[in-house]
Image (cartoon, rainbow, N blue to C red):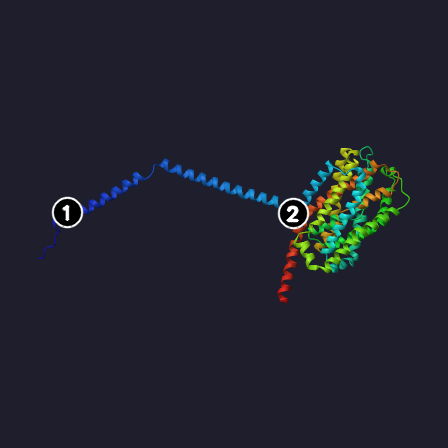
Amino acid sequence: MQETPTPSNASLKETTKEKNTEDCTANRMDMDAITTSPPPSEAVQPNRQTRAQEENDSAVKEKRPKRTKALGILKWFVKDQWFLLAMGAVVLLSSQVQVPASHQPIKRTVVTYLAVSVIFFVNGCTLDTRVMLANYMRWKLHIFVQLQCYLVCSAATFSIVSLCATNPNFMDPWLLIGFLFVGSAPTTMSSNVVMTRQAHGNTALTVVQSVIGQFLCPFLTPIILQMYLSSGSWYSKVLVRGSGYGGIYQRVFMQLGLSLFVPMFVGQVVQHLFPKLTKKVFFEWKLLKLSSIALLTMVWQTFDQAFSTGAFEAVKPSNIIFIVFITIALYFIWLAICFTAATLWLPKKDVIACCYCCPAKALAMVVPLTSVMYININPVDQSKMQIPAIIFQAFQVALGGIMTIGFRRWIRSEEEKEEAEKNVEASENK
């Protein structure tokens, strides 16, 4: 029989000691864990503080982007619509300080000729001659725009004036006649060109339509006005018709020659002689803004004359408010008709040009017409007759400046497409 080996007492003691040691170590570790871990209330407090700090940090981070975004929008608006803000400052300045009455005729002549000359000299330096000639050949478009300017606008104006002329005790007759002058006037030759360029429209087409409209004005406007004023309305009975239009023809054609054709021709010559220098000066040095500054000068001249003659003081406040609403209504009615008709058959750049030609009216043509067509009008009534044109010019410039934002967005896809096609052609040529 073999005996099974039994462990010795010494080995049993050693094994027992090791177990006891392990148990003591585990107990100590458990006790350390228990004693070192914070109580529940003390553990929750730092977590709450941490969460509150994180929420505060996130709130601050959210506020900063909002402030940054608001500042960015403000900077963009000031940069993009600086002309609108400057026009408000100019009107405010003219309401406080005016040129003396003895210097008003000289100021009006100098500013009108010089400002328009600057605008068309800049256009002559920056518009391609071939593009200009191509736009002069588009006779269907000329008929479309001029019919809008003279017939559609005047008919819409006569309809609104007839609706407003129901109460002789409310509206001043000279204001209603002034609206008919505005509706029958040609397109302007300054603000529409500047705004079309800012809206990325066909600037050459706007220049061409301005020239044609100004040329037709002495022949068409008196006939259209007489047609509406001979309807027998109560407000037309205050007028005494003049004997001739020789003064209108002389003034219009002299202004067309000196402030439009000559500066435009000189600008084209400069562009052909110094093409690189012209591009650098007007595009890289941003001297295209000279046109906008010249237009601001014309706005100042108009309101300075109105405040100097006291034209606004001679009209009831209720009539002024009514004129503002009628002006906005007329502008948007003309704009809606033009935009709807033009989008049916014209590309976007031409639509933009038409939308700045048809609703815009030339104050420089309305003022001399009111002075020459009818006689025996005292200065106060003549100023009243010009008030609708003055207010309309301010709104057409302001609304035209705001519309440039929408037109640029509307035409952006077409511009990107044209740019991509040019890049493809350039790469193929290489």
* Label 1 residue SS: helix
In the rendered image, is residue 343 in sight? Answer: no
User: As drawn, which residue projects farthest toward the left?
Assistant: 1
* Label 2 residue SS: helix
Structural distance between the alpha carbons of marks 1 and 2? 95 Å
Residue 155 badge: none
Closer to the N terminus: mark 1 or mark 2? 1
Q: Quadrant of the C terminus?
A: bottom right
Which residue does the image show at 19% across and 47% down from the upper left? 18
Q: Which residue is mark 2?
A: 80
| Image coords of residue 333 (percent x, y) | 75, 45
Q: Are marks 1 and 2 in contact (CB under 8 Å)?
A: no
Which residue does the image show at 80% across and 45% down from the upper left? 109
Instruction: Give residue 329's quadrant in the image.
Output: top right
> Which is nearer the eye, 178 or 122?
122
Give the residue type that dot 2 points to.
Asp
> Which is nearer the eye, 273 or 363?
273
Q: Quadrant of the N terminus?
A: bottom left
Mark 1 surroundings: few (<14), some (14-19) or many (≥20) residues within 10 A: few
Q: Which residue is mark 1?
A: 13
| Image coords of residue 174 (percent x, y) | 83, 38
Which residue does the image show at 80% across and 40% down from the upper left? 103
Task: Tell me: 305 left or right of 22.
Answer: right
| Image coords of residue 4 (percent x, y) | 11, 54
